[in-house]
Amino acid sequence: MPKKLFEPGYMSKTVRIALDVMGGDSGAPVVIAGADLARERHPDASFILFGDEAIAGPILSRHPKLAAVSRISHTDVAIKMDDKPSQALRYGRKVSSMWQAVDAVRTGDADVVVSAGNTGALMAMAKVNLKSMTGIERPAIAAMWPTMRGESIVLDVGATIGADAQQLVDFAVMGGAMARIVFDIERPTVGLLNIGVEEMKGVESIREAGQHLKAANYPDIDYRGFVESDDIGKGTVDVVVTEGFSGNIALKAAEGTARQIGAYLRAAMNRTWRAKLGYLLAKPAFDALKEKMDPRKVNGGVFLGLNGIVVKSHGGTDAEGFASAIDVGHEMVRYALLEKITAGLSHAGAARQLAVANEVSES
């Protein structure tokens, strides 16, 4: 994220980060170690650790520099990774580490919350606690996606199953706002995921959203039409928009394919002594490939469309991966994500009103 300090949109205040210490497969050890790595990269950050002090305290004491900019808010209630969202809300509302971390954003004690916990529970608690932004019917989860050109943003990857045309347009606006921060570009390119690039392809909601985005010509996004699934990896556009069912399938398929390729390569390199020798000679190239495909580098899905910034880390990540999720949250605060989304939605609302007025005048 190549940003310049104090460029337009840069927020100079301390970034206060709430962490769900009990979330994820490993909990406090990974969360606190990840926070310490993030602290080194972001000396302007402070942390509130929500979780069991008896567990988090001794771990935090082993990171004195992090401890100096952190405080623990005790609760011994943790949301389980396999809890249903409704179940988590029933027993974890107001008392769990996840709820309290989200609530810190609502009350203004924190600027962003990062959790590696149960995705469904986190989304449910965030929606109940923070509420949706004005004009947004459903939030979306935006994920960073490695491509042949660098990275793209894909949304929604699981928050909203099914979406109408207006919701897809909202996703495009919100994804564009995130892309302006992450990629440092004024007018990111946006495409709608479809089964073909022709305008007659796809279901009605996608075609209708495409017609609107093309006609509206929003100043903050450069709509490039439909894109296909192979365009995601190519990096054809900066932002790929879809609904949560298709987006989650695409994400899981890509993750599985990456693991499959890795397994094939390891098996091939161990097959014969010649293969092992070839691996040793080509090790720098394989190391570069491993670095490029490292999921930890793009960890951190952003919940868009809420009155607060929420970042979801992979539950099974390590400290480096969790630090990457904190990096994402830090940037979303530092470069005013919510303000950029609000401005984009304002432009979208004006375009919709103009379109309605034109339809009335033509009739």
Image (cartoon, grey):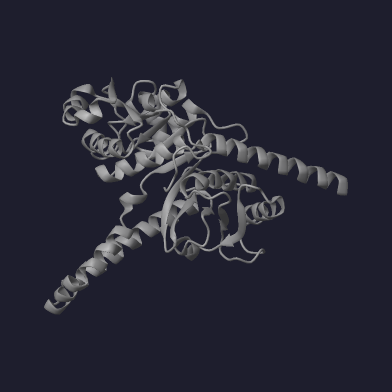
Q: 20 or 152: nearer the eye?
A: 152
Tell me where residue 7 appears, x and y as whole percent. Answer: 50, 40
Compared with 61, 161 (above or below) is below
Residue 288, picture quadrant? bottom left
Q: Is residue 363 visible?
A: no
Total numbered badges shown on the rendered structure: 0
Q: 315 or 110: nearer the eye?
A: 110
Q: Give the side of residue 62 with respect to residue 307, left or right.
A: left
Tell me where residue 75 appears, x and y as whole percent. Answer: 28, 21
Q: Give the side of residue 251 with respect to residue 283, left or right.
A: right
Q: 353 or 291: nearer the eye?
A: 291
Q: Is residue 287 visible?
A: yes
Tell me where residue 107 appears, x and y as whole percent. Answer: 45, 20
**What residue is at 27 percent from the left and 61 percent from the top?**
290
Q: Among all residues in the image, which is located at the extreme left?
A: 273
Q: 110 or 25: nearer the eye?
A: 110
Residue 51, picture quadrant? top left
**What residue is at 67 percent from the left and 53 percent from the top?**
208
**What residue is at 53 percent from the left and 58 percent from the top?**
237
Q: Give the side of residue 36 with respect to residue 123, left or right.
A: left
Q: Give the side of residue 344 with respect to residue 232, left or right.
A: right
**What residue is at 33 percent from the left and 44 percent from the top?**
324
Tell me where residue 22 appears, x and y as whole percent. Answer: 27, 31
